[in-house]
Image (cartoon, rainbow, N blue to C red):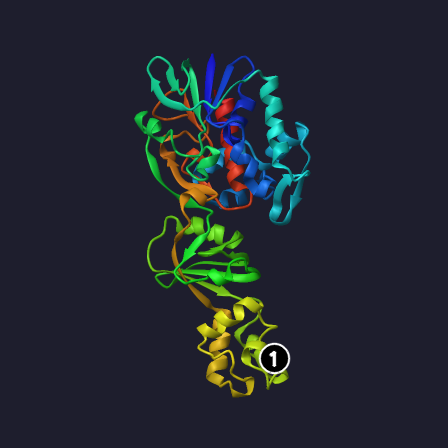
Amino acid sequence: MNVAIIGAGAAGLMAASFIKEEYEIHIFDHNEKIGKKLFITGKGRCNITNSCEVQDLIENINTNKYFCYSPFYDFTNEQVINFFNSNGLKTKIERGNRVFPKSDKSSDVIKVFEKILKNKNVNLHLNEQVNKIYKSDKFYLTTSINKYSFDKVIIACGGKSYPNTGSDGSLYNQITRLGHTIKEMKPGLSAIILKENVEELEGVSLKNIGLKCYINNKLIFNEIGEMIFTRKGISGPLVLTLSSILSKKNGDIKISIDLKPGLTDQKLDDRILRDFSDNQNKTIENAISKITIKKLILPILKSANINPNKKVNEITKFERDNLRKIIKSFDLTYVSNEKLDYAIISVGGVDVNEIDPSTMESKLVKDLYFCGEVIDVDGFTGGFNLQFAFSTGYLAGINI
């Protein structure tokens, strides 16, 4: 019995780790090394999983969370951690229950798989792209180098984000030729592009702020956390989560930043009055320097229609009310998510209705399996996408 795994990323490597020893395993990847995207995850530290309750893992899936019940309960986050620990990788838990290698090196995660592949005598076909898959009595693969036949095939080719890591969607035409449906690919966990010119704010980081999002004036997102301004918009943990939610939404989208979520309107007004009282002869620009960071002062005053050179003792109650409102609701206009090429993950992929969630086997083609980002499932930031990759890889591996 021989098995082809297409894709040497997180899901494909986990699948190879659990395929029976007596099987002949071949992994194909058009990159020069395994785990290329895995290497850059978590800013090079590799957020392996999240140590929350399993039900919370499911709740942190953005698309098709019902599909994740079997994978997440059959190969839990605890089992993922134990898998790496038992293979010599020490782990640690950080803020938000995020699990990382104790060394803070994603390369150490990849070394675990390299050792397993070597011990199992897995045949690695690197720098070899699969161009065609045909099924009759067996699966026939045509690559950039050779032709092969296999009894079973696992497709773990990833999505379409970060194409320079190998996730370029080049195999999707072959998947549709096998009879499967590909849901439209869109950017997820990406920066957000704004209508406003925020170039002067590039690099400005905000902590403990509230981020709200409205679609057609209906509140659909309201969280407190961190964000950062980019040359064309905003990014950071809160924004990445919001971007995935917005990937499948339409309508009039407005984003609002609450710069002081811990203060009620009245307490913020009291704070402003106190600062005004201490700085009556100063300009408004200087007087509010303790309320927010310096680079935001002029944009705030502009939005509030207040001349930054106006003295505090000349500020009217109407202007003060405007200032308070802008600090509590600094409005921005959504244009789009950043391009798919720059997104952390892609939203979309193989239709989950065509895959058995307990085995990862295709419901349409016998002995064909899918795992990882190629499936139309995407999670929020925090280790949930890698957990899905590992869980589905495990199921594909043990069910071969």
Q: How many discs mark residues in the rendered view? A: 1
Viewer-side residue, 374 vs 355: 374
Q: Position of residue 70 (x, y in %)?
A: 48, 33
Above or below, comparing residue 333 to residue 18 in the picture: below
Above or below, comparing residue 57 to residue 16 in the picture: below
Viewer-side residue, 390 vs 5: 5
- Residue 130 lies left or right of residue 320; in this view the side is left
Query: Which residue is at 47% across, 24% downward?
Result: 127
- Local crowd size for mark 1, using a 10 Å CA cut-off: few (<14), some (14–19), many (≥20): some
Q: Position of residue 296 (x, y in %)?
A: 53, 68
Q: Position of residue 34 (x, y in %)?
A: 54, 28
* Residue 169 position by quadrant: top left
Above or below, comparing residue 220 to residue 329 in the picture: above
Amino acid type assigned to the residue bearing label 1 in the image:
Asp
* Residue 331 position by quadrant: bottom left
Above or below, comparing residue 338 to residue 131 in the picture: below
Residue 79 visible somewhere in the drawing: no
- Residue 369 lies left or right of residue 181; in this view the side is right
Residue 60 visible somewhere in the drawing: yes
User: Secondary structure beneath disc 1?
Assistant: helix
Residue at the spot of label 1: 275
Viewer-side residue, 176 vs 77: 176
Query: Which residue is at 53% across, 33% downward?
Result: 36
Q: Position of residue 122 (x, y in %)?
A: 54, 17
Query: Which residue is at 68% across, 29% downward?
Result: 88
